[in-house]
Amino acid sequence: MNGVKKWPLVLVAALLVTLIIASGALHRVDKWAQDWLFQRPGAPSGDIVVIGIDEAAFDALGPYQTWDRSVMAAALEALAADPDSLPAAVAVDVLYAGDTAPEADQRLARAAEALGCVVTASMAEFGTRITWESGRPVSMETGIATAYEEPYEALRQATVQGHINAMVDRDGVLRHALLSVRPEGESGAPVYSMAFQTARLYLAARGQALKEPPAGPQGHFYIPYTARPGGYYDGVSIAWLMAGKVPSGYWKDKIVLIGPCAAALQDAYFTSIDKGAQMYGVEVQANVIQSLIEGRYKAEIQDPPQLIALFLLSCAAMTLFLRLRVAPGAGVCAGLMLLSVGGATLLYEAGWVVHPLWLAAAAPALYVLALAIHYISVARERRALALEKERIGAELALATRIQANALPKTFPPFPDRPEFDIYASMTPAKEVGGDLYDFFLIDDDHLALTIGDVSGKGVPASLFMMVAMALIHHVAMRELSPAKILQIVNQEICSRNPEEMFVTVWLGVLEISTGRLTAANAGHEYPALKNPGESFELLKDKHGFVIGGMEGVRYREYDIALTPGSKLFVYTDGVAEATDAAQELFGTDRMLDALRAGEEGAPADVLASVDRAVQAFVGSAPQFDDLTMLCLQYNGPAGTPAE
């Protein structure tokens, strides 16, 4: 394809990809990627304490709907009982609108006034406002505060008001806080959020001023969460506070948040730091307050400049893809995907929130489109049938190479580490397989080993296998617990698994200096273990559910004490389920016999013994499942196996 015809294709391809992304096709998955990349738990501030309206309070004081305002008054009075141990700010995450019993109303207002640093809740209702002239609509405004509730007059005069409106995203996840509302319209005075007002009072008590966070056009600002659900709430009940069971030093010079901490009160949200469990609204307030106090502000770059940048980068990428061959183009594609995710992470650390998956999704789409254009160009010179065969062959060959390159294939893999020896092999049933194995050093003293079997066969299973292997490798580099690694990987795969594929996985982490192997099993085959002076036996370990089968699964792990000369053999079901012409299975008993026949040799000899036995048993019968095996020999810290 000559240069004159290239540039229109480049512009059209870049514009098409940009428009698809601008339409919101990646909205949900991109938001979840932001959550996974950006939201990392930190240390909750010790200057923020949460006092819960919880089940213990219901047990002590009766159902919440029977409480009058003297309950909160008693809580505020308890906070003010010791003049030498007053809190710096108190936020009451309960809306007290309208008058009720005069005595209870007056008591609450007096208690708040005596404390002098109380923020009470207000709330706006949003809707659409239509302006009419001469019986016809002339304008329409959305997101307008059409109603506003605030504390009753005596309490309003005695406190600072902060709105408690929470705006979840389209997927039901709370990622933003609303800085202020204007009950009287754009010309009216803004009412700031409860979190902002509380942080302002706290800093003012220390002689500091609070800077407003960068808010978007709708007044929202991004929440960099610090703690997951339960991170701030220590179980301290308002009933304990009223009964004098909480020492005054617990809240002295701190921020005290009082609010619902019971599921029955229906004040909880799924948040970007943990979409698996809801967070009480008062803990959301605590997260926002800590980010405001610490000045951890994140500015979200608006979509238009990001779309412009995406279009320009897409033009450059498409130009390269059209000029490069398949393998170099794949390298450029992978580099752009890493740039998208890594660059977004670096920008976040610098205070900017961008879309991490826009370029990561555009690059492979453009790469595939460039490949298609290459094939179309070739089709002008060759017959359609020959081109189709070549395309299929090229795709399968590429898939095979990608899969082969994804699995470790250099043995010995760690020639400078005499403490252990490893050998592994995979024989796919088709051109590409759905089995996986991997091993890698997490650090100088920890070796990760994993083997798995994806449901299905062929290219789909291979692609799913590579995704699972990459996730396991990525998570294992920052987490040593096999059970937690499998839990995180399962959650990630379940969140993006429309084809409902799954994978069985056995995962172990060897502490090289001690020989302690910690492992977890997600529905995989039992490993086989040989200790010095003994023969191979099946190790019937604890099984968990398969990866990708169901969200929220937790896995159990166990320890194996390896001594110098110990061998561990793990495999996929293609070994035990190898079938001969009479439809008889090879089985674990024959596998153990083959292991014992080669158990005195190196790991490569062990695998060769099993492979020979399987091939002799199967004979000319076709192979229906991938045959994957891995053997670890532990030589001890000195690297010398036992005699």
Image: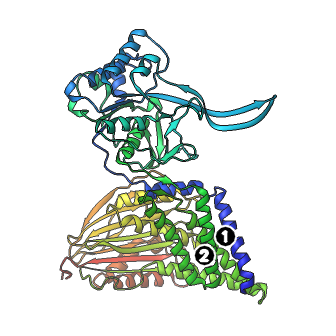
Residue 407, visible in the rendered structure:
yes
Residue 386 percent across, percent down from the top left: 74, 87
* Screen quadrant of the C terminus: bottom left
Residue ID for mark 1: 14
Secondary structure beneath disc 2?
helix
Disc 1 residue crowd, few under 14, some 14–19, many 20+, Cα 10 Å? many
Q: Indicate the amino acid at tag 1.
A: Ala
Residue 93 percent across, percent down from the top left: 42, 30
The disc placed on residue 317 is 2
The disc placed on residue 262 is none
The image's colouring method is: rainbow
* Screen quadrant of the N terminus: bottom right
Q: Indicate the amino acid at tag 2.
A: Ala
- Residue drawn at the location 29% of the way across and 20% of the way down: 77
- Residue drawn at the location 35% of the way across and 84% of the way down: 604
Specify the quadrant of the image occupied by residue 196.
Answer: top left
Q: In the drawing, does residue 559 fall left or right of residue 338?
A: left
Up-down relation of residue 621 to residue 238 (above or below): below
Q: Are marks 2 and 1 in contact (CB under 8 Å)?
A: yes
- Residue drawn at the location 37% of the way across and 80% of the way down: 594
Q: Earlier in the sequence, mark 2 or mark 1?
A: 1
